[in-house]
Image (cartoon, grey):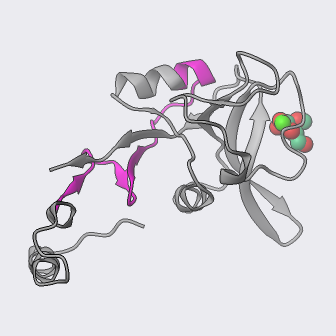
């Protein structure tokens, strides 16, 4: 999870880098920034809009914020984001088969790699469900976060994602 660090800690980190093995390497001194009130990971910025909306309206909302619905590029990313979510809320992500049944497509045209995501057991299960959400399901004692294909018209929460800005 994101945590705040003090100015002194930032200064120390930057100084340790300059004296490291690769001084002056351009990547070393870059700042990856997220908009205020967005959550940050190593690679992206995330935001959960306050209102529940259909999949299409959720997609529109993210676009209006200069972002897009969450694109999951690795199991690590899915795990990272899941830890920040509320267990009894379902969140639309940027994956659908609206263009062609059973042909899952990411909203940013990233190639769909089924090994990079974790579906709930038995999902996707319904060729009338075209929009994917991330939610938590209880299986006996402990629950698990996973993807489910669902009805696009049911208002749900959602996750927007945007690139970090590098300075
Ligand atoms: C609901 C709906 C489906 C999901 C099943 C799993 C009854 O339908 O969320 O998308 O696959 O539950 O049981
Ligand atoms: Ca389903």
Residue 152's quadrant in the figure? top right
Relative to 162, say whether 56 is above or below.
above
Describe residue 50's horizontal placement relative to residue 105 as left or right: left
Residue 86 image position (x, y, % from top left): 59, 54
Can residue 54 be seen at all in this image of the molecule?
Answer: no
Q: Confirm whether the magenta stretch covers residue 86.
A: no
Relative to 35, say whether 58 is above or below.
above
Q: Residue at x 14, y 74 (%)?
A: 10
Between 147 and 109, the residue placed more toward the observer is 109
Q: Residue at x 51, y 40 (%)?
A: 159
Residue 145 image position (x, y, % from top left): 70, 57
Residue 76 image position (x, y, % from top left): 57, 62
Residue 75's quadrant in the figure? bottom right
Can residue 111 be seen at all in this image of the molecule?
Answer: yes
Q: Which residues are magenta?
A: 30-58
Q: Residue at x 52, y 24 (%)?
A: 59
Which residue in the rendered view is the most extreme toward the top? 99
Describe residue 118's horizontal placement relative to residue 166 as left or right: right
Q: Residue at x 90, y 36 (%)?
A: 125
């Amino acid at each position: 999870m994101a945590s705040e660090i003090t100015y002194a800690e930032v200064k120390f980190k930057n100084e340790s880098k300059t004296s490291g093995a690769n001084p002056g390497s351009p990547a070393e001194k870059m700042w990856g920034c997220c908009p205020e009130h967005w959550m940050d990971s190593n690679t992206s910025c995330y935001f959960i809009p306050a209102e529940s909306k259909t999949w299409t309206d959720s997609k529109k909302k993210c676009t209006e914020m200069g972002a897009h619905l969450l694109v999951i590029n690795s199991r690590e990313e899915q795990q990272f984001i899941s830890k920040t979510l509320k267990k009894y809320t379902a969140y639309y992500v940027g994956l659908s088969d609206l263009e062609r049944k059973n042909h899952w497509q990411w909203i940013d045209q990233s190639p769909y790699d089924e090994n990079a995501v974790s579906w709930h057991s038995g999902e996707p299960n319904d060729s009338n469900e075209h929009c994917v959400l991330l939610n938590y399901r209880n299986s006996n004692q402990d629950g698990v976060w996973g993807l489910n294909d669902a009805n696009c018209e049911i208002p749900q929460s959602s996750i927007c994602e945007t690139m970090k800005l590098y300075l």
